[in-house]
Image (cartoon, rainbow, N blue to C red):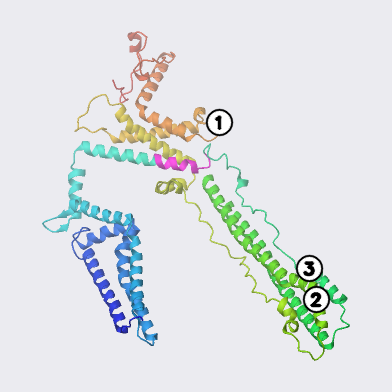
Amino acid sequence: MIPVIPSLLTGVLLLLILLIGCRLVFLLFRYLFFRPNMFGVTFGMRLFTISVSCFLFRDFFYVLFWVPVSLIKVPLEQLLSGIGMMVEATEKIGTDKVYMLIKNVYSLLAEKTRYFTPYFLGGLLTACLLHEVLRSLFYDETTTDYQIRKRSLQFYHSSIIGGPRAVKQNIALFLLMSGSLYLILCVTIAIPYNNNFPGYNDQNKDTSVYKIRMAESGELSMSMNTFGQDTVPLNQAMRTANTEQLSALAKDLLSRNNGQFVGNMEEQHRYLVKRTNEFNNSVKEFVTAKENLVKNLNDKLKGKDGSVKLRYTYYQLLQEYVGNEIRIKEDIYRRALVRINDDYMFYVKDPIARYASAYSGFVTDLRRLKDGDIVPAELSNYTSTNFIFYRQQGDVMPDASRWGPEPIEPTPGTDWGWLGRSASWLIKPNAPDLILLIGMFGFGMLGAAISSFVNIRRKISQKDPLVDNLYIVIIRGFSAAIVIFLATKGGIAIVNNGSNNPNPHVLFLACLVGAVYSERIWEWAKKQLALKTDGGADPLPADENKDAYNKESDQPRQQRSVMAAPDEGAITPID
């Protein structure tokens, strides 16, 4: 016997759980936002650190906000359902019902604990570390406030404006190299997406491949025209049966059963013919909708701009989408076709064949029946009992005009993750010259910055900057990019690679080397021009043991003394 307790106690227990949940939520939010804690000393700082962590870690948001709300929401829902159960109950509620209510509350609350994942711990750690960093930088113990503006201005004036020149120059050099590396990364990601670079569009440059095609499918339409042929054995059995010796009662039973059976079979056949016509009409609509879908997607693909890689990726997505959508609907139609054929076999063809084979036995049984006899039930409803089955509802045909959501156009650089998305600004224009210029500028600046280390011939102290003049680094990098670009467009065969479009990697290598050794290259070129203008002598051969700019001539010093002096301001080779 289940013990019975007052219904009021159930509500009191649930209400107690609800009040405890409300109290816990109140304490949690008061600690998070209205008390100094590990997330910040002031309300604004706590709100900032928690918001940043919630933005980076979704599970952290769920644990801080959704789980506490569940402490109120779940008991309240169970309390309301318990009240409804108590109102409808005519008797007192048993302890088993109370136990189930409390168990539901526990299970629903326990389900929320799945959000306590490593991502929640990551968000918690991020908020705490962010607060500690900001507190060490901007918090003022005397004012118990974050002096963000004051400390930022102090740092700007003391460290940036008034800091040592070497530190500022080195920081600027670091930022310059970081920017050049970012440009190099963007160019590396953008090259495979461009149409015009050799080696990246050979397999997909034929525009005829960008056409969605439908796979050949079997015939879906059907016909229901075998009813006359299937009824021939039954009609022959009815004609050849000897019914002369039957009593009037037996003849009446035979006529009634025959009429009932034939009428039922004709009705079943008419119904299946109707279903067949609906099926065929739906198939025609499906074929038309399928052709329209493919045509519209091909038109969209034809007008799609962008690189070969993006277009080909989008084409593959659309082809897969069309194939899946058509296959799903064709499977539904094939199941409906099989269902109609099975229904015809089960409700029409098979009963007719079995009744035709049993017809002579039925007539033999009727010969024993005399007028005035009580008709047995198995003979009174012979056909409806043994051969007539009630049909089920037909299949619902799919809506041919409705298709699933189309795939989203691929975003440039998605296969590189967030790095690719950061380079999408260079991929979307699909401009090879822009990619070349940006890439050569990035490699040129990197090479010019590297040249500052390569050409150092003396030891520098910590007080001296690595580069005395950053403008020279930028000018070298930019000039190397422009010279290489113009030389390439002018027709240098070594980087043309046998095509109208230059190989970008060769250009980048030439730009990097030219920027690193630009000082030596220009000095060597100047000496060659000086020798030409002095007396038309052939250029001096290169000495294997010396750089071209620093080699010694075999001509007498007196003869070389009359050579044209270098222009004032020319770059002097480093000893």
Q: Residue furthest front?
A: 368
CA–CA distance in space, label 1 to label 3: 70 Å
Helix, strand or loop for disc 3: loop
Nearest to viewer (mark 1 / mark 3): 3
Helix, strand or loop for disc 2: helix
Q: Along the polypeptide, which appears first: circle 1 or circle 3?
A: 3
Residue located beneath label 3 in the image: 226
Q: Is residue 265 left or right of residue 183?
A: right
Please name the amino acid that badge 1 sits on: Gly
Residues drawn in magenta: 184-196
Residue located beneath label 1 in the image: 498
Please name the amino acid that badge 2 sits on: Gly
Please name the amino acid that badge 3 sits on: Thr
Helix, strand or loop for disc 1: loop
Residue located beneath label 2 in the image: 361
Instruction: Indicate the position of residue 547 as horizontal and vertical percent values.
Output: 36, 19
Instruction: Indicate the position of residue 214 as horizontal and vertical percent values.
Output: 64, 54
